[in-house]
Image: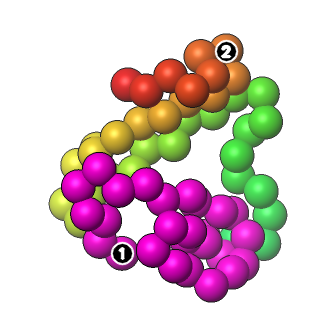
Amino acid sequence: MTLAPRATVRVHTGVGRDTRKDVHQDRPSYVWNNSGDTATPRNDCGRLVDAVSWGHDRGHRH
């Protein structure tokens, strides 16, 4: 999936139909830690393009 600059997308663990605003990992079990975790989307070359954490640093962007 290619995102436009400044686009927003929600990432879901479970199975679902991908759209421009929602993508699904199609995993059978949860991977996010409810007490805190960090999402780190990367581009096709593996370069970090953003990072968002929640928990102790809820909503903190790196």
Q: Is residue 34 left or right of residue 1?
A: right
Can you say whether 16 is above or below 33 in the image? below
Residue at the far top: name it.
56
x and y percentages locating residue 40 in the rendered image: 43, 44
In magenta segment, residue 15:
yes
Q: Nearer the viewer, residue 60 or 8?
A: 8
Residue 1: assigned label: 1
Q: Is residue 18 left or right of residue 46?
A: right
Can you say whether 55 is above or below 16 in the image? above
Q: Which residues are magenta?
A: 1-26
x and y percentages locating residue 3 in the rendered image: 31, 65
Neighbour class for label 2 at 10 Å: few (<14), some, many (≥20)?
Answer: few
x and y percentages locating residue 14 in the rendered image: 73, 70
Q: Quadrant of the N terminus?
A: bottom left
Residue at the far bottom: name it.
17
Q: CB under 8 Å between callouts 2 and 1?
A: no
Q: Amino acid at mark 2?
A: His
Of marks 2 and 1, which one's residue comes earlier in the chain?
1
Image point 79% across, 36% down: which residue?
Answer: 34
Inspect this view and state whether residue 18 appears. Answer: yes
Secondary structure beneath disc 1? Answer: loop
Image point 48% across, 59% down: which residue?
Answer: 9
Reading the image, the residue beneath label 2 is: 56
